[in-house]
Image: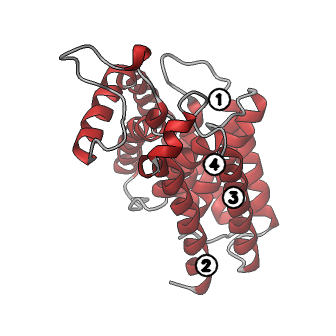
């Protein structure tokens, strides 16, 4: 690993560590969680998380410019891709489908993990501004979409086997659709309160309570996901599967032409 790759990897690790902490810390601070249950989840800390994440995204760009892994033309491509991806959120689709998961997967795969993280996170920011979707949920959406692009850059490259490549990306896009929903629910789930203060006798709870333990937490969250989010995420998965199968190959060829023309390296 070169010095530039190490620096970029370190910054992305810091950003991902921040994201993991932001999603999971309510489970380890029950007093703080209980105090926020009457209001909106993460209303107090979301602005700080957002500022730190945006700052780390800028550091990734600057670090890549300093180490010449990117240049001004690549940053321009990033800006164009972010703009295009943000507008794709406006494309209507059935159930939970959104076309904006398409480009982070392909760009992460074609351009590398750092580029994939940036396009996922920053396009969520821009789309939030366009759709007036600014709120405490936004930094968590940025993390989840950024991770999709990040992991896409780690997939094995099968450039000599185009059909297998598209099938792999389609399968990954389908899996991502469910992972995105599983991860995103965690931004508010620890703060949910059952109407009336609890469940009926014999009814399995789908909310978290301090001190219930890891196994009970996983079981309750699994029940919550199955009863509220699974079919919504299934609609997203079907849409991403079809989109990647139909358009994955031509768009990937176009992205590779950009990569060759601008001559920037990938991780």
How crowded pointer 2 is (Cα within 10 Å; few <14, some 14-19, many 20+) is rated as some
Q: How is the image coloured?
A: secondary structure
- Location of mark 1 (residue): 89
In this view of the protein, which residue sits in the foreground, 188 or 73?
Answer: 188
On the image, numbered disc 3 is attached to which residue? 52
- Residue 144: x and y, percent? 52, 45
Q: Tag 4: Cα neighbours inside 10 Å, few (<14), some, or many (≥20)?
A: many
* Lateral position of residue 251 relative to residue 225, left or right: right
Front residue of 81 and 118? 118
- State how far apart marks 3 and 1 are (Cα): 24 Å
Number of residue marks: 4
For the residues marked 4 and 2, what is the alpha-carbon distance in whole angstroms?
A: 19 Å
Residue located beneath label 4 in the image: 121
Residue at image mark 2: 7
Q: Residue at x 76, y 78 (%)?
A: 66
Gap in Å between the C-alphas at discs 1 and 4? 13 Å
Residue at the image point whose x is 74% and y is 40% from the top: 126
């Amino acid at each position: 690993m070169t010095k530039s790759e190490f620096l970029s990897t370190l910054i992305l690790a810091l950003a991902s560590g921040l994201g993991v902490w932001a999603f999971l810390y309510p489970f380890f601070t029950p007093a703080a969680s209980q105090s926020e249950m009457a209001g909106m989840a993460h209303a107090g800390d979301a602005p700080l998380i957002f500022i730190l994440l945006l700052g780390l995204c800028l550091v990734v760009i600057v670090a890549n410019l300093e180490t010449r892994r990117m240049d001004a033309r690549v940053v321009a491509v990033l800006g164009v891709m972010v703009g295009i991806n943000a507008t794709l959120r406006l494309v209507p689709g059935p159930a939970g489908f959104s076309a904006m998961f398409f480009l982070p997967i392909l760009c992460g795969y074609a351009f590398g993990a750092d580029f994939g993280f940036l396009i996922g996170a920053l396009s969520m920011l821009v789309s939030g501004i366009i759709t007036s979707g600014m709120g405490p949920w936004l930094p968590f959406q940025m993390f989840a979409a950024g991770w999709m692009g990040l992991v896409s850059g780690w997939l094995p490259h099968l450039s000599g086997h185009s059909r297998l490549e598209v099938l792999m990306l389609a399968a990954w896009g389908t899996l991502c659709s469910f992972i995105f929903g599983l991860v995103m629910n965690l931004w508010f789930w620890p703060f949910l309160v059952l109407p009336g203060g609890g469940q009926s006798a014999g009814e399995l709870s789908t909310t978290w309570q301090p001190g219930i333990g890891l196994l009970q937490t996983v079981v309750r969250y699994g029940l919550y996901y199955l009863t509220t989010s699974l079919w919504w995420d299934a609609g997203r998965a079907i849409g991403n599967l079809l989109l990647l199968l139909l358009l994955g190959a031509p768009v990937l060829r176009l992205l590779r032409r950009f990569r060759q023309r601008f001559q920037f390296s990938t991780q």
